[in-house]
Amino acid sequence: MSVRRTVKKVNSDSEGDAKKKKRVVRNHGSEEDSGKREMQKSAEAEKQDADWGGGKRVSGSEEKQGCRFSLWNFWVSSTVLKLLLMPDYFSTDLEVHRNWLALTNKLPLLDWYREATSQWTLDYPPFFAYFEWVLSQFVPAVVRDDGCLDIVKEGKFGWPTVVFLRLTVIGTEILLFVVLQVFINTSDESERTVNFIIASSIALSPGFLIVDHMHFQYNGFLFAILIASIVAAKKERYLLCGAFFTTVLCFKHIFLYLAPAYFTFLLRAYVLNFSNFSFRTYRDLIFVVRWFNLLKLGVIIVSILAVCFVPFIPVLPQLISRLFPFSRGLTHAYWAPNFWAVYAFMDRILTFIMLKMPYVHKCATKIVLPPLIPNSIEEIKNRIGASNYGTRGLVQDILFIILPQVQPRLTFALTLFYQILAIIPVLFNPSFKRFIGCLTLCGFSSFLFGWHVHEKAIMLVIVPFSFLVSMDRRLLTPFMLLTASGYVSLFPLLYQSSEFLIKVLYTWIWCIIYFSALKKTVKVSTSIQRRVFFFDRLAVCYCLLLVPMVLAVESLGVMKFKYVILQKYEFLGLMCYSIFCSIGVISSWIGLSWLFNFDEPLWV
Amino acid sequence: MSGSSGAVASEKGQDTRRSCVEESFFASPLYDFLYPLRPVANQWSAKYIILIFALIVRLAVGLGGYSGKGKGPLFGDFEAQRHWMEITTCLPISRWYFYDLEYWGLDYPPLTAYHSYILGRLGSFVNATWFKLNTSRGFESIDLKSFMRITVLLSELVCYIPAVMYFTRWIGRHRNQSPIGQYVACAAILFQPSLILIDHGHFQYNCVMLGLVVYTINNLLDEFYGFAAICFVLSLGFKQMALYYSPVIFAYLFSRSAYYPRFNFPRFAGIAIATLLTFGALYAPLCLFGDFRNIIQSVYRVFPFSRGIFEDKVANFWCVTNVIIKYRELYTQKQLQFYCLLTTAIAQFPAFIIIFLYPKKFLLPYALAACSMAFFLFSFQVHEKTILVPLLPITLLHISTNWDVLSMVAWINNVALFTLWPLLKKDGLLLQYAIMFLLSNWLLGNFSFVTPTFLPKFLTPGPSVSDVADDYRRRSLLPKNIFWRIIIVSSYVCMAFIHLLDLYVQPPRNYPDIWVLATCALGFACFTAFWLWNYYQLYRMRNSSLNEL
C-alpha cells in the first residue's frame, strides 16, 4: 500500500518523470514478497468499495495503473453488432449513395453536379463527392458486376453492393473512434474518467447506430471531423479548429448551422485581442486585430475552400442550386420534433375544435382579425380540401388551416435571432465552455426553427452537448431530456417490425448506462447547490414516459392487421412521436438557455 | 485458481491482484466490460445489462435467414413451427397428432403442442391470416418472421435466461465467488453461439427444453426434488431429446432418496408422485379431448423408429463409421436399433454409476455432459442440432475456475459450432456464423493474443476501464497439458482447412458431400476426445468438493 502511495505522489509531480519512477517502484515491489502481499490486500479492499467514477477512489486507482481508457473493446463489440445488422432494412439513402458512387466513378468532374438520370442527384458539397470517388476506386469486381457502379434511373443491386456500402460506413467510422481516443488521451488525468464516458457515449450512440448502420448514411466520420475541431478548440489550437470545421463544412453543408458559433469564437479568441485595449482614437482599433493570425487563419480556410470549389467553377451556379434546394416544404413527411411540429399540431387541434364547436371560431374571430384566421367555417373546410390536395402534390408543403402560414424568411429570422442570442456571450468571453455552449445552442436553434429540418439533424445538437455536459451536473437534466427524446425521435426512420426491439433495447440500455454513469462522475462545479429538484424529477418522469409512448404507438401498428381502420390513422403514431419528442427537445433547449444566460458560476 | 495463470503472473512479476476464484476470466473483454459494475451500488444493473445485450445479439442474429426460407414446397423448421401453430389453433386436440402427417406432422411431445397453441393464439390475435388452416402454408412475410422471432425470444426470456442466471448465482454464492465473477460466467453462458444460431437463426425452440433442464438442475441444487422432477418431466414433455439426460437425473434422484445420506421415503414418494402427476397432466388433455388412441399416436410420432439411423450428416459414431461400414446394407432396421441401444447403454453406464454412487451437486454438469454426449454419439436418429443437448451441461461448466476445464469447454463449444456449419450454410447464415464465432471467443479473451502480436505498439489497446495492468495480456484458453494443446490446435487448423475447402473447392462429382463428411469426422473425433476427458474428469472429481469445480 505504501509503495502505491508513493507512486501517487510521484505521479502528481510530473508526468514523464513519474512514469519512469513508477516502473522502478513497481519492479521493486514485485521483488519484495511482503510488499506484494500487502498490495494484494489493499487491492481486495479496494474491490469491495471502489466505485466507478466515484471520484476519488477511481481517479486514484487510475493513476496507479496508468489506465489507458481505450475504446478498443467498444469498437470491436459495436462493429460486431453492426456487421450483424447488415442484412437489416436500409433506406433509399443507400441507393442515393450508390448512385453518387456510380456517377463520380463514371463521369468527368464537371458533370457530377449536372447528371440527373436518377432522381437522387448529388447534393452534397464537393468534398463528399471526392470522398465517393475515392470509395469508388476500391469497389471490387464482384460488387461492380452486381450493378453498384451503374448510372441508371433505379439501381438494381443485390447483397454484394449492400455489403460493400455497409462496410464502407463501418470502415470510415473508425475515424470517429480514433478522434475520440485522441480526445481521451489528450485530456487531463483529472477529467479522464468523465471524458472516457463522454467519448464512449458518442462512439456507441444509438443515433449513429440507427442513422448510419441501419438507415444508412455516413455521419460517423463526418462527426469525427467535427469532434476533431472541437477537440482542437479545447486544446486552443485555433488554426486546426478552423481547418477541421471548414473541411467538414465542405463535406456536408448542414454544418453551416454551426458556422456562426465557430466564426465568432475564432474571431474573438484568435483574431481579436482586447487584453490591453484602451480606446483613444479609431486608430487603436487596428491594433485590436492580430493581423498575422488573421492572415494564417484566412489562408488556411480559403485554401481549403479553394480545393473544394475551384475545380467546379464552371458549374458553380448549378452546384449552388443543388446544395440549397428551396423547393422543399417547411416540415418533412414525418415532422421532426421541433417547434414547427408543435405549431402544426396546434393547428390540427384548433381545426378539430373549431369544426366541432363553431362558437369557438366565432369567439376567436372577435379577438383575432380575419386575415390571420379563416373567415368562416366554410373557408376552413375549403382549406382542408386544399391541404389534402397539397400533400398529394409534388411540393410536399404543409398548409396550415387556422394558424398563419410560415414563410422561409420567418424561419431564417427566428434561427438567426436565437443564434445571435447564443453568440453574444462568446463575444464577451471566448472560453471553451462558452464556445461549446454556444455551439450547442446554435444547433438547437437551427433544429428547432429551421426550414425543412430532418430528424437526423438532432445529432448536430447531441454531439456538442455531450462535450458540454461534463462541465456541470446541472446540465445533466437538459442533456437527459435531449438525448432521450432525440434518439426516440429517430425511431420512425426504421418502421419495420424486425428491428423494432433492437432499436428500443439499444437506446434503452444506452440511456440507463450513460445517464447513471454521468450522474456518478459529473460534479457540480460550484459549492452552491442551485438545482431545481422538481424539474429533475419531471425530466426523469418524462424520459420514463417515452417507453409507454413507444410501446403504445407500436402496438397501434401491430393492431393494424386486425382493425383495418387503423391503417388510415397511421399518421397518428408519427404525430405522437414528434409531439412527445418535441416537448423534450424544446424543454431541454429552454433549460440549457436558462443556464447559459443566467447562471454565471457555471461558465467562469 | 489454476496454476497456469499463476505462472503468467510470475512471468510478469505483477498482477498480484487476482485473488482467487472469481478471476478465471480475468482480463477478458467480458471482465473489462463488467468491471465498472463491481461496486455494490452498481451490481443490481449487471444482470439487466447482460440480459439486454444478450437479447440484442439474439435479435441481430434473427435479422438473418431462417431454415427453408423461400424453399417450397416443404420449406424448413420455421415452416414446421408455424404449421404446428396453425394446426393446434385451428383443429381440435384429438386431431393434432393425426392431421396430414406428410406435411410436417406434429412429432414432438404434447408440451410443444401446447406451447404452439398459446403462441398461435397470440399470433392469430395479431394477424389471423398467418395461421389459417391450409391456406397459410408456406406463408412468408417480414411481420410473420418478426413475430416468430419474438416468440423464441420470449420463450428464452422465460425459460432459459433466468435459469442460467440463477444457476451461476447459486454456484457463485456457494463458493464465495465475487458477484462480478458470477456475472462474467453468466454472460459467457448466455453468449454461447450454437444455441443462439440454432434458435434465433435456424429457428427452433430448443431454449425451452434446455431452460427447463437448467431449472431442474437449479432445483436439484436447492434440494427441491419434487420440483426438479416436475421441471424435468416438462422438459421431456417439450422435446424428447431431454431423454439424453434422463439416466443421470434418474440416478441422482434415486440415490439421493434411497441412500444418500439415508433412505428418505417422503422424498422418494414426492418425486414419484410429482413425476406421475406431471406426466398425467401433460397427457390428460390428449386423452380427455380425444381418446386413448391419441396418446398412442403421439408416442408413436415422438419416437420415429421407422426413420433411418441418422438424419442428414451428423458427427456421431454411426454416421462417420458409415463411410467404411455400410450399416444400412448390412443390417436391418431392427438390428440397428438394437445395436444403437446396446452401445448407448454401455456408453452412458459409467456416468450413471458414478452419479449413483456419488450423488454430488457439483458433479451434475459433468455427469449430464458425459451421459448426453454418449447418447449423441451412439444413439439412433440423431440430428446435427442435437449437439445442443450435450452442449448445455458443458457450457454450464463456464462457472468452473479451473483453467483446463474452461479451455476444454471453450474448445468443444467451437467444435460444436463448427459441426453446425453445413446446416447454417444451407440457411444462409454464414455471416452470423462467423460473427458469433468471433464474438463468443473474443468475449472470453481467446483473441487477446492478436492485439500485441499483430498490431503496432501505438495501436495496441490497453484495457479500457478495468484494473488490468497496462501490459498484461490474457492468454488464450488452452489446457496446460501439451498433449491436449496439440490436439486442440491441430483441430483448429483442420477446421480452418475444411472451411477453406468448403468455400473455394468444388467437391468431386462422386462425393458431393465430402466436405460435410469431413466436418462430421472432425467433429466426431473431437467430441469423442472430449467425452473421454469428461469421463476422466468425472472419475477424478468424484471425491472432491464444490470449490474445486
Image (cartoon, coloured by chain):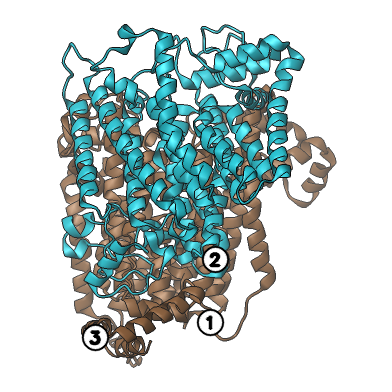
**Tag 2 and tag 3, C-beta contact below 8 Å:** no
The reply, left or right, for residue B348 in relation to residue A108 is right
Judged by depth in the image, the label closer to the viewer, 1 or 2, is 2
Mark 1 to mark 2 CA distance (whole Å) = 34 Å
Q: Position of residue A232 (x, y in %)?
A: 29, 70
SS for callout 2:
helix
The foreground one among B546 and B121 is B546
Residue B91 is tagged as none
Image colour assigned to chain B: cyan
Residue B42 is tagged as 2
The residue that disc 1 covers is A600
Q: Quadrant of residue A347?
A: top right
The residue at the point 36 percent across, 41 percent down is B413
Q: How many marks?
A: 3
SS for callout 3:
helix
The foreground one among A234 and A66 is A66
**Tag 1 and tag 2, C-beta contact below 8 Å:** no
Q: Amino acid at mark 1?
A: Glu
Mark 2 to mark 3 CA distance (whole Å) = 35 Å
The residue at the point 61 percent across, 15 percent down is B298
The residue that disc 3 covers is A28
- Image quarter in which the N terminus of chain B is found: bottom left
The reply, left or right, for residue A540 in relation to residue A417 is right
Q: Are marks 2 and 3 on the same chain?
A: no
Would residue A154 be seen by someone viewing this image from the given angle?
no
